[in-house]
Image: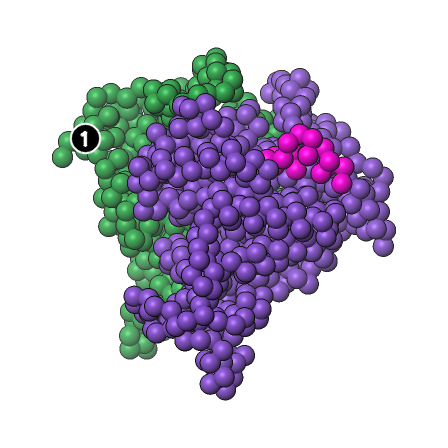
Chain colours: A purple, B green
Amino acid sequence: MAAVLQRPHAAVLCLLLLYLTGGLSIPDPKQREALIKLEASMQTGGQLVLTDTEQRLDARLFKMKQEELEREDFPPAMHFFKARKLIRNSPIFKLLQKMPKGGALHVHDFSMVDVEWLVKNVTYRPHCHICFTNDQSIRFIFSSQQPKPLPHCSLWTLLENLRAKTVNTTDLDNSIMGNLTLFTDQDPEALYPTQALVWKRFEQIFQAVFGLVTYAPVFKDYLYQGLSQFYMDNVMYLELRALLPEIYDLDGHTYGKAWALKTCQDISKQFVANHPDFVGVRIILTVNRWGIDIEKMVQVVEEAMALYRDFPDIMAGFDLVGWEDRGRPLWYFRDALSLPVDRGVSLPFFFHAGETDYQGTEVDQNMLDALLFNTSRIGHGFALSRHPLVKELSRKKGVPVEVCPISNQVLKLVKDLRNHPAAALMSEDHPVVISSDDPALFGASGLSYDFYEAFVGLGGMRSNIASLKQLAINSIRYSSLTPNQQEKALSLWQRRWDKFVSENAFW
Amino acid sequence: MAAVLQRPHAAVLCLLLLYLTGGLSIPDPKQREALIKLEASMQTGGQLVLTDTEQRLDARLFKMKQEELEREDFPPAMHFFKARKLIRNSPIFKLLQKMPKGGALHVHDFSMVDVEWLVKNVTYRPHCHICFTNDQSIRFIFSSQQPKPLPHCSLWTLLENLRAKTVNTTDLDNSIMGNLTLFTDQDPEALYPTQALVWKRFEQIFQAVFGLVTYAPVFKDYLYQGLSQFYMDNVMYLELRALLPEIYDLDGHTYGKAWALKTCQDISKQFVANHPDFVGVRIILTVNRWGIDIEKMVQVVEEAMALYRDFPDIMAGFDLVGWEDRGRPLWYFRDALSLPVDRGVSLPFFFHAGETDYQGTEVDQNMLDALLFNTSRIGHGFALSRHPLVKELSRKKGVPVEVCPISNQVLKLVKDLRNHPAAALMSEDHPVVISSDDPALFGASGLSYDFYEAFVGLGGMRSNIASLKQLAINSIRYSSLTPNQQEKALSLWQRRWDKFVSENAFW
Ligand SMILES: [Zn+2]
Ligand SMILES: [Zn+2]
């Protein structure tokens, strides 16, 4: 999409500025109105021409927002864990749930399905063993025999037996659930006072979930269930960041990345067959930037190139994940990341970059380096607004930022989402998409919660139905789908959008 | 100052962008280095050429910053009330205290002097009466007779008598002190959970201080003491936002704005006579935007025009103060604010504007309106980065933003100062000055604490000695001093700067 064409006409702007800098006498209300309109036209969606029905819905949304802003407890100003209940009751949120939101382009494989499903469905399956680690976490494994003990962990117990011995299984299930998500009813500020602590807990949860979701039957069901939950939230397409770890069977068989990719492809096809208005899922292979050296990174990139060649339909590209501030910067891995270009082999990148509050550090250069390595999108880009040159580069190259407001808040980059730096990006129609990163870990689901935060928090009274429409369109335009696939997805989306608008514009 | 000249050469930028958007193969380390340098050159101070000695000091500062960033408790990420102790022990802060910082352009009249001086000096003067309000606050009055009781307040007690009857006067003094500042050793988040509450307390404190500082002898001493404290903090010039309320005598005489202005002028002259390297103080007359109607605003503006005509040396201009979100927007007062231009009379404006987290509200248009009314500076402009057109207008017109980091944090606009939106402004050398707003209310003093937050928090590893130098220069260039006065002030500052650099570059 030609981002340049969407900017306000430079000539108009220049003329106005020249006139104004010449010094005004008394401000002319008409000119003031024109300036306010001109600025509004610069924001995300500001160049879209709305139908009458869309304008009606917009008027309705405007009223709803005014009421939302007058509330004592303004949800985007609060921690999401405290705000969730309020958001659920918000008429805006209910409308956003119904809205066809396009694609979710930044979601991680093992955090798409709500943890209740994991506990109520997965841990109740036969052969599920649990053990308790020394550091207050849990591990799971499915096995037909007694599994070998893990270091720093209690002996494995068959969960079925444990439940039989437990008086209050609801308590047990709730306790398990609490170990599989960061979400809590306690005070999140007290529970996670620092970034280091919340990331530590993040990693622990990942370990706890791991034994459940890498069990082959669950791996398949989890993906299907994940697609269902996003589909229910009116998301029509997914790009999943996936580690594609070794998958195991009850009898000890294991399966590699190719099997996992093939499985994802099968599940995707199956889901689309059952839901013809869903487009499918594509996979971005990820590796943790922690504890990996250059040599190993070379191997991983080589593997990614081979998989991209062998599974062009399902495989979208490659990315590094994990806490950026504590991991190696992209530039450290430059030789490995140059391999595809070196060898004339194609491998799109979708780098997490700029998920940091620190400025001028080595890590803070990741966004520039991501662009130098021709990344297709920037994951988070939280620090982008402080990098005028990188920002301009991202705009000129049409490389969007994947904005995940709730993730940034829970992982303690920003407290009050009105201050999220992407608010500035959206005010100038910088290419952005909204996503949910790890919804299950944050107690969210699908995209609607993050759309709420972006629309009400980042956007304030200014973002409108056109912003929402543009964000949905962006999520298709900036996806890794081919131009043809994009056209198909867009026309599918447009039909659903028109229906949504006409069903909700009148009340 | 021609802000345009300080931007990186557009041609260089364009060439680089064109080259890059053509698609790179493997990133060239030299080109990458050039891009990083180019971006660094775009920030505040990025165009200054440093001497060898300045570069040495810069290297020292860089090391100090690295150590500061490695600390578990990073002060700019914490509430200032908790961070103050850490900041006081920071070697960077100690250096910033010694640094000649130029002028303080955004400070309010009755919050310049630390409250300890108010209690230990002022309340110990004869004839000081105190009363206790129903809403847990206090009031003061100096009077040779028993003063008339206030509504919603206890009877007046002579503080001297109260102290004589009190066993522990230290406790009493501490309790009084606690009523004269927002600063607290308790958890500030718990004590001031909402903006409404912190602003309410702010207004209460203002009422409590009022009876002390509007007593004529104290009014004079307070100003002199204020200048001393800023002078001790190596600030050479002040522009004070002043309400110039009615000043009273022991015998019931009262004095108006003209008297107050004349007194400020005398004190300023006296202080400069005693401290020849101090430039003086100028006054920006302010009125609270709360509870004032258009008619009254017309009167106030007329009075301001008269005072500006009669006291051209001391009087700098006019401004509105008070909680912006709850007050009337500037546009509401447009007829009153147009009076000077209407009548061909000069009255510079220095509007508080954009001290808000809400976007797209009426109040959020204050920055645009301030510029349309030809404001000389924008007070706070916290919301500016979300207004691309207003931002461009402010840049083109050379209208700087007065950034007061600690104020914005204490008044709950932003929690972690690394996320202060002025970080983005400084990354692109938007015209800014750093100031302290109400240092006594926040437990700060002078400018050094706010310089620390701007330099370490907003700037991260990126801001450097050139940023500091530019900020000091900006504070003179963007002052209301005449060009001649600015040149004199600048050469005075330059001498002190060179001394500061040479004394601290080697260690
Ligand atoms: Zn992510
Ligand atoms: Zn102020």
Please identify the quarter of the rendering in which residue B448 is found.
top left
Residue identifier under label 1: B505
The residue lying furthest to the left in this view is: B507
Amino acid at pointer 1: Ala
Q: Image check: B359 left or right of B263?
A: right
Q: Image check: B432 left or right of B497?
A: right
Q: Can residue B486 be seen by looking at this rendering?
A: no
The x, y position of residue A241, in whole percent, is 51, 45
Chief secondary structure of the magenta portion:
helix
The x, y position of residue A502, in whole percent, is 84, 47
Q: Residues within 10 Å of mark 1 (few under 14, many from 20)?
A: some
The x, y position of residue A505, in whole percent, is 83, 49
Residue drawn at (38%, 50%) of the image: B77
Image quadrant in which the N terminus of chain A is located? top right
Does A478 appear in magenta? yes
The magenta region covers A476-492
Image quadrant in which the C terminus of chain A is located? bottom right
Q: Image check: A104 left or right of A152?
A: right
